[in-house]
Image: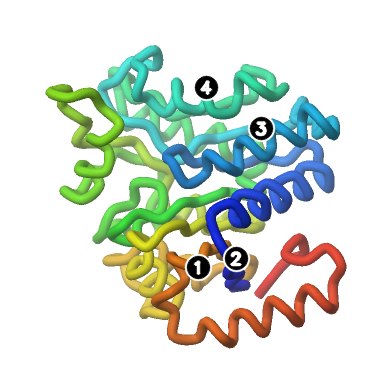
Amino acid sequence: MLVVPVPDAAALDREAARIVAHRVREKPTITLGLPSGSTPLGMYRGLIRLHREEGLDFARVTAFNLDEYLGLAPTHPRTVHRFMREAFFDHVNVPVSQIHVPDGTAADLEASCADYERRIAEAGGIDLPVLGIGRCGHIGVNEPASSLASRTRVKTLTAATMEDTRRQFGAGEPGPECAITMGIGTILEARHILLLGAGGAKREAVARAIEGPVTATVTASALQLHPHVTALLDREAAAGLRHLDHYERVMHTTATVTPDRFARPTG
């Protein structure tokens, strides 16, 4: 894992957009795994700017979102469907037919989850999932005690995740209690992985994920098992890392040795 501390959230946004843009240019038919939430918003703004100003082309990109709330119609203002359209898809040229988000209203959820896995397999797997990290150390909505071999399925949100989620909903509007999420096993089959960590609220989760034991209690810790992970962290999120000085030296060496830092496979 290459741990990349950056000074602040603005630097994280720039680097994340640069890494994704490099991968899109390197492989125009790339299959991306995309997150929702506040952490990737700056990255999406950066990619939109690169699309408009530098012609970054998403016409052959396929996108799979990591999760969706259960029981909300795609038109609901708080769904991942709606978030992704407004934050990213409506502003770039990814064809609608190449955009995939789990169906939170499917009559047969088990079949719908299996179909999502089938579509991922037919696309050749995920080349690059971009992951946020929850306060309890989850990626996607793979809450504590999720199987590290899991596939797309329904998960019940923890109290902490529900609290974070309810901030997105109006006063008096009940937030969701369950979500469909891409599984840890699915994510670990990706070719490269980009983990984003921003803010002091993620400090403990980041430290446990990167420097703690691999455990289903902190599902992001499973990323330690993958050979090509870049963890991009702002200063506040990285502050709990015991070996932060070492990671900074590695970053400096990598930047010196390879002109296009962080764009190569990392171990």
C-beta proximity under 8 Å, tags 2 and 1 = yes
| Residue, disc 3 | 62
Q: Secondary structure at mark 2?
A: strand
| Residue, disc 4 | 86
Which marked residue is nearer to the observer: mark 1 or mark 4? 1
Check disc 1 and give the amino acid type.
Answer: Arg
Check disc 3 and give the amino acid type.
Answer: Thr
The part of the image, by quadrant, that contains residue 232 is bottom right
Q: Nearer the viewer, residue 251 or 113?
A: 251
Q: Quadrant of the C terminus?
A: bottom right
Q: Is residue 146 left or right of residue 119?
A: left
The part of the image, by quadrant, that contains residue 190 is bottom right
Which of the two discs, 1 and 4, labels the residue nearer the N terminus? 4
The circle drawn on residue 6 is 2
| Residue, disc 1 | 235
Which of the two discs, 4 and 3, labels the residue nearer the N terminus? 3
Residue 72 in the image: above or below residue 30: above
Q: Is residue 252 left or right of residue 140?
A: right
C-beta proximity under 8 Å, tags 1 and 4 = no
Which of the two discs, 2 and 1, labels the residue nearer the N terminus? 2
